[in-house]
């Protein structure tokens, strides 16, 4: 048997023997339309709907050719039948194949189901985008290969049970096919008004209207609206019948919604579907994943619940889509920052990733094996999550089981190291890893996991204050003086930790002090211990060490002692440093002849003369000093017998005699009962009066 061109259309070759046996069975003269439908329709799919005289043609051909009847004669018959189609529509921009089929059927006065049957296939196969059925209809309707491909691309071709290929992009079926059919009433009215025929024969259903993520007609700036809803696919996609049901409402404008702004998201999505062009980093993603990400991210930013499976985009969700795209359009780094802010906000409220990201996290986390093109988004969000939440090895985050840890919480670090949470927290605060004033639940205080091993090793070697003093051979007063001036500091706050000192710090201090020290003799004169020098000079041990390191002075190492007890400095340095230090209130009072205990301090406290508060380098406590500016301010307003005698270079008795001569009285102050301080203004006035 020869191969027939019908095989390309999945039309079986008719067996000549079978045909002969049928016609020789006595029914040749009685061959009728019903006989044709019963015996030949399963073979060729032609019925009496469009080809009522096909049986007569077949009988005539049989009588003409007899046993020489061949498949080529059938092809001739098919081409002749094809010419009997009354009208064939031409495809429109963005039109679906189902819309084209419905218009072709309507133009020829039949339903899509009847038309498909008459063309030798079934409407169900076309709805299921069966390649042979679609190509068969395309051949009959004189569609070019490019026209047929364009129609199918805007319709969607099935890929398995749950996916479809739409405009070259893989999408889940429910993102395209749904009982609710949407459209733009303005587009449909324009289609009807452009022709004088019945509106349903001209109304074109666009393919982009099927896509869940498309919410607005970019050409008219109006939201897509539900036109009808039908669960049965054969009725749902009988578009001409359904449009006929609502044509009056469409043409009257009843279904036309108010205009809305066309956002950057709408323009991006429309261009992506029409041309495949995408200038954003979302080009790396399938359009379904990219659009869903925009929708869910925008909804989370607006703190609005978004149902990722919903087929209809509500007005509020349109705003979410626009907001999400605005964030993503700014770049991947900006998107990462926004995701990080959302995560940190949720983390501070005690939420996990699911609570912080809501439906966005759910969408990326569940049923991962059935999602296409989301690996990039999973990696993006997972990286943000691991930088906020302290997930550990063995835990699964967005489909990936972790093998390491990026962050520790106080509780996880304590469990791993066996060190008490309080001790760990103090160590982390001392290192500046945690903030002292920000105290949260132990599971919410996180830090880089790399810090734990170093801190743990330090904590395990730490010693008590008594042990540390024994290590460096220092007394408690000496250690306190070194701490107050910053010469040495504990690793943890003393008083809050049982073992606040690191032995390494003590060894490093002694190395600094004694590495360049000169060896003294047992009977060496003119040297004193550094602590004594600090106490006598009022200069801190740290300042003494800094002065020695910066100048020509040397530190001596006494042979009778070891450690800190062996650190000596020249006595000459004590006097030199003392001269550089501002005097205390008591020292300044003695220098101007006031020896009554606390009298000058009360004078300062009453606000008569200024004093500067500074930290005592030895005790670490703040106290008042008289700087050069303070002394100048005092001498400008006041004088004492001693200060005026030094100023004039005379004996104190001379000043006392002059005071008696002028009849001066002391400055009236509760703190000066003995009249030791005098006002210069008052004295000058009395002197002028006496002259």
Image (spheres, rainbow, N blue to C red):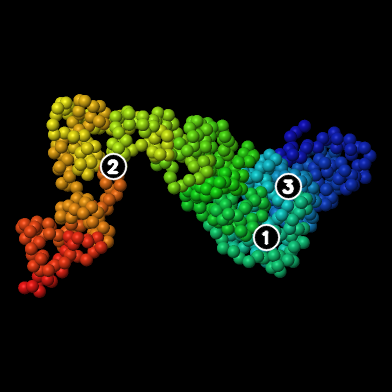
- Res. 42 in view: yes
Left or right: 457 as drawn, with respect to 26: left
Badge number at residue 570: none
Q: Residue at x 63, y 66 (%)?
A: 258
- Res. 167 in view: no
In this rendering, the count of numbered labels is: 3
x, y (%) of residue 55? 86, 47
Query: Alpha-carbon distance for marks 3 and 1?
Result: 23 Å
Front-most of residues 442 and 679: 679
Q: Residue at x 91, y 42 (%)?
A: 28
Q: Residue at x 19, y 65 (%)?
A: 667
Query: Alpha-carbon distance for marks 2 and 3?
Result: 86 Å
Left or right: 64 as drawn, with respect to 628: right
Q: Residue at x 45, y 34 (%)?
A: 452
Location of mark 3 (residue): 127
Front-most of residues 257 and 187: 257
Report crowding for label 1: few under 14, some 14 to 19, many 20 or more residues within 10 A (C-alpha).
many
Report crowding for label 2: few under 14, some 14 to 19, many 20 or more residues within 10 A (C-alpha).
many
* Pointers 3 and 1 in contact (C-beta within 8 Å): no
């Amino acid at each position: 048997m020869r191969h027939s061109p019908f095989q390309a259309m999945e039309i079986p070759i008719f067996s000549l023997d079978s045909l002969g046996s049928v016609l020789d069975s006595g029914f040749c003269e009685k061959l009728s339309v019903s006989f044709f439908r019963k015996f030949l329709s399963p073979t060729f799919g032609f019925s009496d709907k469009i080809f009522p005289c096909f049986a007569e043609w077949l009988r005539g051909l049989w009588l003409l050719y007899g046993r020489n009847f061949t498949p080529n004669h059938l092809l001739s018959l098919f081409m002749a039948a094809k010419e009997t189609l009354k009208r064939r529509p031409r495809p429109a921009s963005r039109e679906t194949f189902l819309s084209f089929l419905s218009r072709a059927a309507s133009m020829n006065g039949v339903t899509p189901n009847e038309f498909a049957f008459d063309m030798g296939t079934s409407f169900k196969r076309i709805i299921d985008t069966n390649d042979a059925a679609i190509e068969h209809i395309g051949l009959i309707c004189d569609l070019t290969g490019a026209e047929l491909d364009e129609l199918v691309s805007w319709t969607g071709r099935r890929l398995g049970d749950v996916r479809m290929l739409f405009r070259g992009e893989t999408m889940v079926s429910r993102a395209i096919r749904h009982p609710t059919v949407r459209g733009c009433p303005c587009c449909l009215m324009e289609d009807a008004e452009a022709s004088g025929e019945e509106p349903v024969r001209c109304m074109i259903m666009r393919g982009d209207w099927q896509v869940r993520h498309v919410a607005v007609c970019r050409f008219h700036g109006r939201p897509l609206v539900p036109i009808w809803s039908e669960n049965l696919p054969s009725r749902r996609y009988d578009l001409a019948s359904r449009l006929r049901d609502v044509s009056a409402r469409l043409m009257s404008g009843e279904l036309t919604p108010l205009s809305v702004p066309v956002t950057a998201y709408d323009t991006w999505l429309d261009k992506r579907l029409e041309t495949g062009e995408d200038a954003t980093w979302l080009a790396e993603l399938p359009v379904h994943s990219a659009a869903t990400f925009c929708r869910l991210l925008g909804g989370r930013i607006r703190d609005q619940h978004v149902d990722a499976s919903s087929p209809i985009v509500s007005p509020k969700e349109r705003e979410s889509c626009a907001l999400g795209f605005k964030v993503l359009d700014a770049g991947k780094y900006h998107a990462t920052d926004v995701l990080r802010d959302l995560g940190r906000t949720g983390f501070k409220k005690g939420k996990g990733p699911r609570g912080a990201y809501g439906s966005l996290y759910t969408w990326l986390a569940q049923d991962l094996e059935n999602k296409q093109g989301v690996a990039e988004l999973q990696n993006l969000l997972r990286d943000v999550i691991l930088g906020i939440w302290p997930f550990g090895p063995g835990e699964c985050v967005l489909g990936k089981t972790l093998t390491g840890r990026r962050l520790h919480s106080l509780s996880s670090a304590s469990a791993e190291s066996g060190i008490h949470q309080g001790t760990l927290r103090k160590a982390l605060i001392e290192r500046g890893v945690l903030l002292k004033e920000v105290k949260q639940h132990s599971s919410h205080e996180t830090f880089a996991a790399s810090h734990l091993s170093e801190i743990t090793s330090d904590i395990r070697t730490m010693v008590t204050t008594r042990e540390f003093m024994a290590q460096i051979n220092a007394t408690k007063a000496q250690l306190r003086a070194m701490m107050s001036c910053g010469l040495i500091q504990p690793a943890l706050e003393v008083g809050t930790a049982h073992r606040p000192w690191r032995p390494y710090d003590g060894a490093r201090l002694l190395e600094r002090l004694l590495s360049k020290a000169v060896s003294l003799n047992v009977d060496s004169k003119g040297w004193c211990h550094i602590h004594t020098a600090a106490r006598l000079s009022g200069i801190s041990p740290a300042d003494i060490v800094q002065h020695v390191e910066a100048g020509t002075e040397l530190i001596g190492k006494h042979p009778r002692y070891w450690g800190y007890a062996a650190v000596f400095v020249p006595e000459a340095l004590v006097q030199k440093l003392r001269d550089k230090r501002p005097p205390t209130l008591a020292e300044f009072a003695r220098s101007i002849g006031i020896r009554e205990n606390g009298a000058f301090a009360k004078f300062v406290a009453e606000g008569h003369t200024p004093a500067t508060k500074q930290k005592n380098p030895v005790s670490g406590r703040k106290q008042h000093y008289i700087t050069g500016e303070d002394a100048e301010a005092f001498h400008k307003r006041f004088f004492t017998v001693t200060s005026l005698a030094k100023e004039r270079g005379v004996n104190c008795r001379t000043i006392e005699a002059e005071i008696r001569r002028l009849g001066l009285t002391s400055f009236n102050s509760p703190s000066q009962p003995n009249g030791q301080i005098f006002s210069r203004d008052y004295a000058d006035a009395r002197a002028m009066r006496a002259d």
